[in-house]
Image (tube, rainbow, N blue to C red):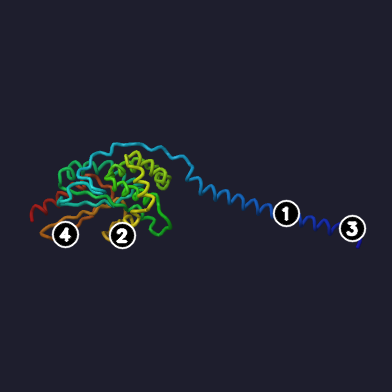
Amino acid sequence: MSPDKKSKRQERRERMRQQETRRRLLTIGLITVGAILLVFAVVWPQIRPVAEVVAVDPGTHPNADDNSMGDPNAPIKIEEFSDFQCPFCERFHQETEPLLRQYYIDTGKVQFVYRSMGNWVSQNTVGKTESQDAALAAYCAGDQNKFWEMHAHLFANVLGEDAGSFTDKRLAAIAEKAGLNMDDFNSCYGSGKYEDRVQQDLKDAQAANITGTPGFLITYTVNGETKTELIAGAVPFSTFQVKLEEIRNQISAQ
């Protein structure tokens, strides 16, 4: 074999070795970057700073009992199916709920119950949403009869939909602002105690033909017959007033 042919063959082999080395280095680099990104995705939620949590005055809630308020023997019951990340639910909480308390709940005409429907848009997805976690936290607060305090603080601390408003750390910070016993709260929340309850809320909403948040199921009895009415959306207080006065007239006329 001539020296020229041998030299060219050696050059080809050297180029192939260099190419293989570059491929291996590139593969190792990609694997390393992927591993770093994976570790970051797992660790970052645990170490990132918790956005500031504000304290608010939750107001008064007559006959508060877990997630209900008002006279349990009131002739009319309103169940709100809601989502702590829903801007329309927040609007109802801020604008309409105080008037309902003043004119109907405080006066013994209505019992009001809050129920979670924060998982209705993600019922076919894997894992929980921040809305579901917020509902779990609120129900845990109910164990300490501070549901409505937690309810007010959750709405006051929304950063945006699934934007880190209700991470585990931030829910704990919100619970502390709401005045909860943190040992009891952490034990309840960490155990997932109310996961079945949150799922049942959704099933009951669907059975009542509620398809969005907020939705309101109004129940009352006339001449021994249980009747229901639905109100959809963050309607103004006047809409509730008209409907509730119609119902009260039916009850009075029996």
Q: Nearer the viewer, residue 9 or 200?
A: 200
Residue 26 shown left or right of residue 134 in the figure: right
Closer to the eye: label 1 or 4: 1
Question: Which label is found at residue 203?
Answer: 2
Residue 201 shown left or right of residue 244 in the figure: right
Give the Cα distance between marks 2 and 1: 59 Å
Task: Say which residue appears at 65% left-offset and 54% top-offset.
Answer: 27
Question: Which label is found at residue 4?
Answer: 3
Counting from the top left corner in percent of width and height, residue 2 is at: 91, 61
In the rendered view of the protein, which quadrant contains the N terminus? bottom right
Amino acid at pointer 4: Thr
Give the Cα distance between marks 3 and 4: 101 Å
Task: Say which residue appears at 22% left-offset and 49% top-offset.
Answer: 112
- The total number of labels drawn is 4
Indicate which disc, 3 or 2, sits on the residue closer to the N terminus. Answer: 3
Q: Nearer the viewer, residue 198 or 182?
A: 182
Indicate which disc, 3 or 4, sits on the residue closer to the N terminus. Answer: 3
> How dense is the environment of label 1, judged by Cα within 10 Å: few (below 14), some, or many (20 and up)?
few
SS type, badge 4: strand
Task: Say which residue appears at 17% left-offset and 45% top-offset.
Answer: 104
Q: Nearer the viewer, residue 83 or 136?
A: 136
